[in-house]
Amino acid sequence: MSTVRQFVVGNWKMNGTRASLAEIDAVRSGIGGVACDVGICPPATLIAAATERARGAALMIGGQDCHTAAGGAHTGDVSAEMIADAGGTLVVVGHSERRTDHDEDDALVRAKAEAGWRAGLLVILCIGETEAQRRAGETLAVLSSQLEGSVPDGSSAENLVVAYEPVWAIGTGLTASNDDIREAHAHIRTELVARFGEAAAGIRLLYGGSVKPGNAGEILPLANVDGALVGGASLKAADFLGIIAAAG
Ligand code: 13P
């Protein structure tokens, strides 16, 4: 079991309209007294309304991405400062869907993480191997290189959360085996402690990839698993609350 307070975060991806704010209300009602921290990252269009619905509750709201700049001529982008201004306190950077769909590389992800800090946001930085990399036996090397390239200097338990999301387990219904998760998370922990010292033991490591109420009870107690980053199962409050109930 994790040695820190676990953190369960919902990533709604490009899903959700104002009608979905009812799910925020339901999550809010269901998390009184839970043993973990909880966050939801809705699409940018809903951040301001979601923070209003979450006001006064132990429910963090955040963005799914940010630009590196605070503002300027970047049509369609959202800055970390805008997320903070809308009431958000979190930002996800380096999600594999951004790395793939928008060709984001480690250097850009690192700059986005620093932009998140500049705006005072807690950064959730995603890493993970593709199926081809896993089959080639490159998983741990890929994780090391992503950590080295995308995690900024100055990272700490207060400003950074790392999410391990094997790309082949996202949205597929496949989850990594318990041994695979243990091995990856232990490796990430070792790398972070080697770089940032013993205090990096407090940096929360989330697992992501087809986490559901039915498997959360098995995944969340694994060593070095300090929570979950949840896609599809975070869209319905009942499912998301089922995962939260398994955290401690
Ligand atoms: P799923 O839970 O839908 O597999 O998505 C995981 C994810 O990518 C969360 O960021």
Image (cartoon, rainbow, N blue to C red):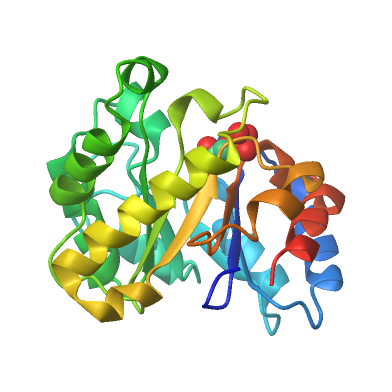
Extreme residue toward the front, this view: 179
Total marks in image:
0
Picture quarter with the C terminus: bottom right
- Give me the residue at 86% from left, 71% from top: 29
Rendering coords of residue 79 (x, y %): 31, 55
- Give me the residue at 46% from left, 71% from top: 89
Residue 206 drawn above or below residue 52: above
135 on left or right of 43:
left
- Out of 12 and 181, give the one closest to the viewer: 181
The quadrant in which residue 102 appears is top left
Q: Can the viewer see residue 68?
A: no
Rendering coords of residue 32 (x, y %): 81, 80
Picture quarter with the N terminus: bottom right
Residue 33 drawn above or below residue 81: below
- Out of 34 and 176, give the one closest to the viewer: 176
Residue 12 drawn above or below residue 121: above
- Give me the residue at 29% from left, 73% from top: 200
Rendering coords of residue 142 (x, y %): 24, 34
210 on left or right of 92:
right
116 on left or right of 86:
left
- Out of 75 and 229, give the one closest to the viewer: 229
Q: Quadrant of ligand 1?
A: top right
Residue 18 drawn above or below residue 169: below
- Out of 146 and 225, give the one closest to the viewer: 225
Q: Can the viewer see residue 48?
A: yes
Rendering coords of residue 246 (x, y %): 76, 61
